[in-house]
Each structure stands twice: as structure tokens, then as C-alpha cells.
Image (spheres, rainbow, N blue to C red):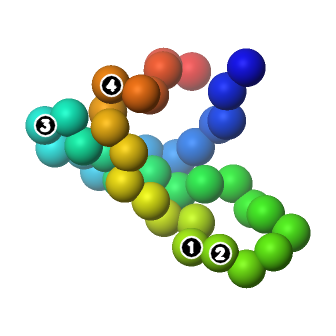
Amino acid sequence: MGLQVTLLDSQGDEAVVVLPDFPFEMNRIIRVKRSELLPS
């Protein structure tokens, strides 16, 4: 099971993604390793 995110940018093994809405305040744009992402 995974979390569906929106890919904004990727470079090398780093990706910038937008997390889905959450019921509390937090930064929804984060950096992750591209190798941790799976195609939808």
C-alpha cells in the first residue's frame, strides 16, 4: 500500500513531491529519494 503524491520535479535520485491534503497544518511539499517512488 502506498500514498499517491504529485511529482513536481526530479533530478538524479531526488524528487520533489506534493503530499495529499491532511487535516492538520504541515508542509505538503517534500523531497524524497526517487528510488522510493513507484509508478501509478
| Label 4 CA crowd tier, 10 Å (few <14, some 14–19, many 20+) | few
Q: Which comes sooner in the sequence, label 4 or label 1? A: 1
Asked whether residue 4 appears in the rendered view, the answer is yes
Picture coordinates of residue 17, whole percent (x, y)? 45, 51
Indicate which disc residue 27 carries.
1
Count of numbered marks: 4
Residue 26: assigned label: 2
Residue drawn at (56%, 73%) of the image = 27
> According to the image, label 3 marks what residue?
12
Image quadrant containing the N terminus:
top right
- Which one is earlier in the sequence, the residue at label 3 or at label 1? 3
Q: Distance between the residues labelled 3 and 1?
A: 23 Å
Task: Identify the amino acid type marked 2.
Answer: Met
Q: Which of marks 2 and 3 is nearer the N terminus?
A: 3
Secondary structure at numbered mark 1 = loop
Q: How crowded is mark 3: few (under 14 residues within 10 Å), some or many (20 or more)?
A: few
Q: Does residue 8 appear in this view? A: no
Among the two numbered marks 4 and 2 on one chain, the one whose residue lies closer to the N terminus = 2
- Camera-nearest residue between 36 and 11: 36
Secondary structure of residue under mark 3: loop
Query: Going 32% across and 33% down the picture, which residue do you hit?
Result: 34
Helix, strand or loop for disc 4: helix
Relative side of 3 to 33, left or right: right
Name the spot of residue 4 as percent of width and height, x first: 64, 37
Q: What residue type is labelled 4?
A: Ser
Mark 1 neighbour class, 10 Å CA radius: few under 14, some 14 to 19, many 20 or more? few
